[in-house]
């Protein structure tokens, strides 16, 4: 078996000539004839290795190679099995943003798919590019302007690199990747899509809000879109566990709590025995019931642990104004609270981000964060640079763009409620006679799917495997808006294993309701139905938060 590794074919920056102008003049890059066994040719296009000579604005093409069909080892050493033949192009946008484009030769489906990153990024998402390529997409990913080997303090201190990571990297990559794709195949992609989760979900919202012309369809999973406030949520819980070590919740404590919540609130949707809540908003469990009575220490929580639980459930708030900053964790997610209620590991994210970008102090102590003055500093210095939370999506909607957002209720990294808060805020800031009439208009281009028992981007105790990309593609290309997406729970979350259950995911404010007959492990036993009661409460709470925010400002 032959396994190809990425090579390099150097190129120097030429006179900047746009791709459209290149085609208009009938110019082509001339080189040797392609191999007879290769599909490395297209009417009006260029050969792969000739792309090293292509002129792309502010960009140096550092590699262009034809990769034969079969197994391929990426630059990080990961083997990707059974890929089709493709043209691999690597490039750098000045001053430091690296990206790669993988273009199928004979198997291209005439579509482009940009893929997102996770966390602080610093690497190209080969693991997302490979399956996209296998499905026929030309695909691209970027390191967002820095390498994992770079000092975190260093790139965060660099305004250009912070801007790339926080706002512009996907746009810079997308514009250039499309130029390279057009040069190779002699035509532009018929449709362009973006899919990402966590930081990639934030990048997806950057595209919808700030660069609405880049993509026809966008999928945003578990979006870290309110990133500066996600970091505040991390500090909110980390300060609690560090300052109150007797209140830490270990695995057995979290299981005890989760079991109690499921026993109290499970089955309210007509389904008994689910290891998750179908709609955590309907749970009103009183945590005081688990507090140890005098002399007891088994199967109960100490007073300090109860206060920790209340703290994690509670919204992050400005301690002077009472302003809501970020929602708390949902009922039913307790078993996933190792980072929220036991280990303050995630503080390694806000420490350099706030330390450098807000306080200009690499030694800043995150334990000292003040929940009034420091909140104001973050929102002044950092939030505008990295938080795509604008509610005006008209630029994306007006050009026919379609947006699917998904969020797991049991997300261990961030609150499952944030997308609902954002969605209701989008509704409230639109013109319309009623919120329901506005909802109909917004659902023409933007739909939110909550995932009962779902984790962060993937995984979780509930059904969590579904195909949002195909759903948004059908919406864009055929006008078929997704009325539901069927999610599957595989044993150990491995698709080669048996199916444990399937369940429909419904567009907010709908939820999956049991029809009263049929196996509860099968999606066909459920239908999506409107939950107007919880919707009205969501809208009322968001109205109240907006009023408090206005008074605080």
Image: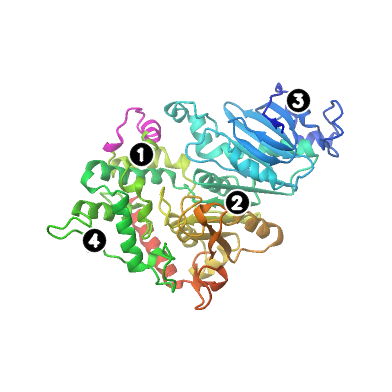
Q: Tell which circle, 1 or 3, labels the residue nearer the N-terminal end.
A: 3
Q: Give the residue at x 38% y 43%.
A: 231
Residue placed most toward the observer, 346 or 459: 459
**Residue denoted by label 3:** 53
Q: Is residue 366 magenta?
A: yes
Mark 4 vs mark 3: in front: 4
Residue 318 visible in rendering: yes
Q: Which residue is mark 1?
A: 345
Rounded to the nearest whole Å, what is the CA distance between mark 2 and mark 3?
A: 32 Å
Disc marking residue 218: 2
At a point 36% along the width and 27% down the height, the residue shown is: 362
When the figure is inspected, residue 233 is found, relative to residue 149, above or below; the finding is: below
Magenta-highlighted residues:
352-368
On screen, residue 535 versus residue 123, left or right, reads left
Residues at marks 2 and 3 touching, judged by CB atoms closer than 8 Å: no
Of the image marks 1 and 4, the number of the one nearer the N terminus: 4
How far separated are the C-alphas under marks 4 and 3?
68 Å
In the displayed structure image, the side of residue 127 where residue 315 appears, left or right: left
Mark drawn on residue 290: 4
């Amino acid at each position: 078996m032959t396994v190809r590794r990425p090579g390099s074919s150097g190129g120097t920056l030429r006179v900047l000539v746009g791709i459209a102008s290149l085609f208009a003049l009938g110019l082509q890059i001339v080189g040797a004839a392609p191999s007879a066994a290769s599909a490395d040719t297209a009417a009006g296009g260029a050969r792969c290795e000739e792309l090293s000579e292509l002129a792309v604005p502010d960009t140096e093409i550092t590699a262009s190679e034809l990769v034969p069909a079969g197994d391929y080892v990426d630059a990080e050493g990961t083997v990707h099995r059974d890929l089709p033949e493709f043209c691999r192009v690597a490039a750098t946008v000045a001053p430091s943003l690296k990206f790669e484009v993988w273009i199928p030769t004979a198997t291209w489906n005439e579509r482009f798919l940009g893929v997102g990153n996770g966390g602080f990024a610093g690497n190209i998402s080969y693991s997302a590019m490979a399956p996209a390529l296998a499905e026929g997409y030309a695909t691209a990913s970027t390191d967002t302007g820095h390498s994992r080997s770079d000092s975190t303090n260093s790139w965060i201190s660099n305004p250009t690199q912070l801007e790339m990571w926080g706002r512009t990297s996907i746009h810079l990559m997308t514009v250039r990747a499309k130029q390279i794709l057009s040069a190779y195949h002699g035509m532009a992609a018929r449709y362009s899509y973006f899919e990402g989760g966590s930081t990639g979900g934030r990048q997806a919202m950057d595209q919808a809000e700030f660069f609405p012309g880049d993509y026809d369809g966008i999928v945003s999973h578990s979006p870290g879109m309110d990133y500066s406030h996600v970091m505040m949520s991390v500090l909110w819980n980390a300060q609690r566990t560090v300052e109150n070590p007797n209140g830490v919740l270990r695995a057995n404590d979290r299981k005890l709590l989760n079991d109690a919540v499921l026993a109290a609130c499970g089955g309210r949707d007509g389904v008994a025995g689910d290891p998750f809540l179908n709609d955590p908003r309907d749970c009103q469990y009183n945590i005081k019931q688990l507090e140890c009575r005098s002399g007891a220490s088994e199967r109960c929580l100490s007073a300090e642990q109860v206060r920790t639980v209340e703290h994690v459930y509670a919204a992050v708030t400005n301690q002077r104004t009472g302003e809501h900053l970020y929602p708390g964790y949902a009922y039913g997610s307790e078993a996933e609270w190792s980072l929220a209620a036991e280990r303050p590991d995630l503080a390694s994210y806000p420490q350099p981000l706030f330390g450098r970008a807000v306080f200009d102090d690499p030694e800043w102590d995150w334990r000292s964060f003040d929940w009034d003055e420091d909140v104001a500093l973050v929102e002044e210095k950092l939030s505008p640079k990295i938080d795509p939370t604008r509610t005006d999506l008209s630029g994306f909607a007006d050009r026919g763009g379609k947006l699917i957002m998904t969020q797991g209720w049991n997300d261990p990294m961030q609150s499952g409620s944030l997308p609902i808060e954002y969605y209701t805020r989008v509704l409230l800031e639109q013109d319309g006679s009623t919120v329901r009439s506005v909802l109909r208009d917004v659902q023409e281009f933007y739909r939110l799917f909550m995932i009962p028992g779902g984790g962060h981007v993937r995984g979780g105790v509930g059904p969590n495997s579904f195909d949002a990309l195909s759903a948004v593609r059908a919406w864009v290309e055929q006008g078929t808006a997704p009325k539901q997406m069927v999610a599957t729970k595989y044993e150990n979350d491995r698709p080669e294993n048996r199916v444990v259950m399937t369940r429909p995911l419904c567009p907010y404010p709908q939820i999956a309701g049991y029809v009263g007959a049929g196996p509860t492990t099968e999606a066909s036993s459920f239908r999506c139905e409107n939950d107007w009661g919880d919707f009205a409460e969501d809208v009322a709470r968001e109205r109240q938060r907006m009023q408090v925010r206005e008074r605080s400002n």
